[in-house]
Structure formats: structure tokens, C-alpha cells
Image (cartoon, rainbow, N blue to C red):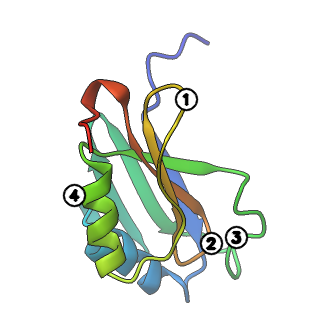
Amino acid sequence: MSPRRLAGVLIYTAADRFPAMRRFYVDTLELPVRSDRDGFVNFQWGAMRLTVAVHSDITGGTLDPNRVMVNLEVPDIHEEHRRLLGASVPFSRPPELEPWGGWVATFSDPDGNTIQLLELPETSAVS
């Protein structure tokens, strides 16, 4: 296989948990919705797609929140961190400068999946 790029990420959830997951990604994170239908919401994030969908074999929240981590690149991590704190998103890690020059902040979605905000060095502003 000779992959060109990562086209997207799919996060499965239980049917009873989907409304909370949808609200979180649509209303709290304010991701740009590409497609929205019963049990399925898809977002355009740059050249990539992120999908949250119901799967009949999924029950409850994630069993291992560190197995997969979704990184969302943002132009100003401090501004986004303040906005999400205002929306009551609890961060397990506030924005921190990494040795490689970028900034990282970590939180979880309603199912317990680990999500990180990422501000890459080439877009990092002095804060």
C-alpha cells in the first residue's frame, strides 16, 4: 500500500450516547459539519474528515481512552483553551509548550476518548 494521506478518523459510540457526543463535537468544539443524519455526524477538518457514528456493537464509554488520540490542530491554542474552559470542558492537561516547539492541551469527549489541541511550531505565536 502506498497511502497518499490520512483521509479521516471515525469514532464509534453507542446509540444512547450519540446525542451527547454529537452536541459535544457540534456545539462545544464547533467543528464544521459536513454531513449530519440520524446516528451519524461528519466534520470537515482541513483536508481530513472526522466522523462520530453509532455502532450496534458499542456500549458505554471507551474502555481505554489512551488507545487512540485525536489531535485537532488550532491556530491559537490559548484562545481555544479559554473558549472550551468557558464551555465547561475539563482539561487533563492545560496548554504546554513541547520540546519540539509546538503546544499541546488534552481533554476528553463525553465517551472518554482522549482529544488534544495541537498548535504546531510554524503557527505558534508568542504567548
Disc 1 residue crowd, few under 14, some 14–19, many 20+, Cα 10 Å: few
Q: In which quadrant of the rendered view does residue 86 lie?
A: bottom left
Residue at the far top: name it. Answer: 2
Residue at the far bottom: name it. Answer: 16
The alpha-carbon separation of the residues under discs 3 and 1 comes to: 30 Å
Q: Position of residue 83 (x, y in %)?
A: 26, 70
What is the number of the mark on residue 32?
A: 4
Q: Amino acid at mark 1?
A: Pro
Q: Amino acid at mark 4?
A: Pro
Q: Secondary structure at mark 3?
A: loop
Task: Say if residue 37 shows up in the picture.
Answer: no
The alpha-carbon separation of the residues under discs 1 and 4 comes to: 31 Å
Residue on which the image places disc 1: 99
Indicate whether 4 appears above or below 102: above
Disc 2 residue crowd, few under 14, some 14–19, many 20+, Cα 10 Å: some
Front-most of residues 51 and 64: 64
Among numbered discs 2 and 4, the one appearing first in the sequence:
4
Residue on which the image places disc 2: 112
Q: Are marks 2 and 4 in contact (CB under 8 Å)?
A: no
The alpha-carbon separation of the residues under discs 1 and 2 comes to: 27 Å
Q: Amino acid at mark 2?
A: Gly
Q: Amino acid at mark 3?
A: Thr
Front-most of residues 43 and 84: 84
Task: Say if residue 85 shows up in the picture.
Answer: yes
The alpha-carbon separation of the residues under discs 2 and 4 comes to: 21 Å
Q: Are marks 2 and 3 in contact (CB under 8 Å)?
A: yes
